[in-house]
Image (cartoon, helix red, strand yellow):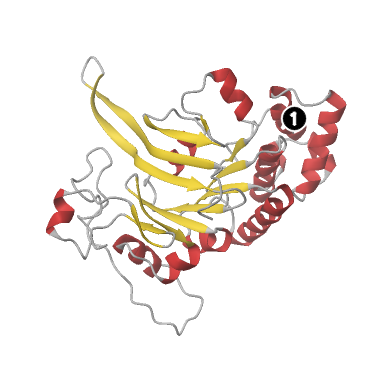
Amino acid sequence: MAEAQALLEVKNLKKYFPIKGGVLGRTIGQVKAVDDVSFAVYPGEVLGLVGESGCGKSTTGRSILRLIEPTEGQVYFEGTEITSLNEQSLRKLRRDMQIVFQDPYASLNPRHTIEKILAEPLIVHGVGSVKERRRKVHEMLEVVGLNSFHAKRYPHQFSGGQRQRIGIARALTVHPKLIVADEPVSALDVSIQSQVLNLMQDLQREFQLTYIFIAHDLSVVKHISDRVGVMYLGRLIELADKDQLYEQPKHPYTKALLSSVPSVDPDEKKDRIVLKGDVPSPASPPPGCAFHTRCPDCMEICKIERPEFKQTSDGHSVACHLY
């Protein structure tokens, strides 16, 4: 994996949102939603990003695609640095980088038919004639488990799972290389989640896709991912192969997260690690390690010095002074 050429490389990515205040609306602070995140994604793999709500994982995904502009850092896609590209160059690249949004209700235009929604990316990128685009739309509906006659319907005529299938079809119409899946199953019933996950795995094999799969459900991430990155308060704190991470977690926060996953075996006894205190505000993160205010293994150096995110063993990286 390490020898392969990275499809996507993220270096020191930051996204700060200004806090306005006063009569003149001056900037009085910043919310550090993404704070110095670096990782690479390789062709054909699924990289899972997990963490509790508000940790910055969705903002990371959107900043990579420049749906929101990063504050600092570089993003390389197939060796091209995309954070400095102009709008015209970026539009050409968007064919290769697509997103599946979290909310299948809000991400589809209620005034448009499904055919118009799915044809729009093809029109934007100048792909095919009207007849070819219609054929492509019908083909993509069949691929995601719907019927071609659904093309004439409107989003409100579908269930949540069907809408998410339409969202996936829209991302696939231009045959991208990378898809950022932003919590694609969190808004769905549990029975539908497995169907959509299995569909995404089948599509990955069929279309040779690479995923960044963002979620807060650790069991979902384990099911679909090859490697998993754990985020806390805008920072990436651990990154490893999924088996390594789930069997031998290194960071105290990762251990606490995994201890909270319910077991399907009622007789299995787990030592639950209960974290004390609240998550600090990203507007004023604590000095040193962001997790030190809740960490059971906190040392004096943790309160002063921010730990470096570095590789501790083969393919296992962690940001913790314990290592």
Determine the residue positioned at 71% across, 34% down.
174
Determine the residue positioned at 46% across, 23% down.
84
Q: Which residue lies furthest to the left in this view?
A: 300
In this rendering, position of residue 169 left or right of residue 222: right
Residue 71, how many percent across, how many down?
36, 29
- Nearer the observer, 6 or 124: 6
Residue 319, how many percent across, how many down?
30, 54
Q: How many labels does the image show?
A: 1
Q: Residue furthest right?
A: 131
Residue 240, how many percent across, how many down?
44, 59
Determine the residue positioned at 85% across, 34% down.
135
Q: Is residue 58 above or below residue 248?
A: above
Residue 146 visible at all: no
Residue 143, how many percent across, how many down?
78, 48
Q: Which residue lies furthest to the top in this view?
A: 24
Residue 300 visible at all: yes
* Amino acid type at image mark 1: Ala
Q: In this view, does 180 lie above or below 130?
A: below
Q: In which quarter of the image is residue 131?
A: top right
Q: Mark 1 points at which residue?
A: 119
Kind of element beneath mark 1: helix
Q: In which quarter of the image is the C terminus?
A: bottom left
In this rendering, position of residue 61 left or right of residue 123: left
In this rendering, position of residue 76 left or right of residue 72: right
Q: Quadrant of residue 259?
A: bottom left
Q: Is residue 140 above or below residue 201?
A: above
Q: Which residue lies furthest to the front in this view?
A: 3
Q: Quadrant of the N terminus?
A: bottom right
Badge 1: few (under 14), some or many (20 or more) residues near its Cα, within 10 Å? many
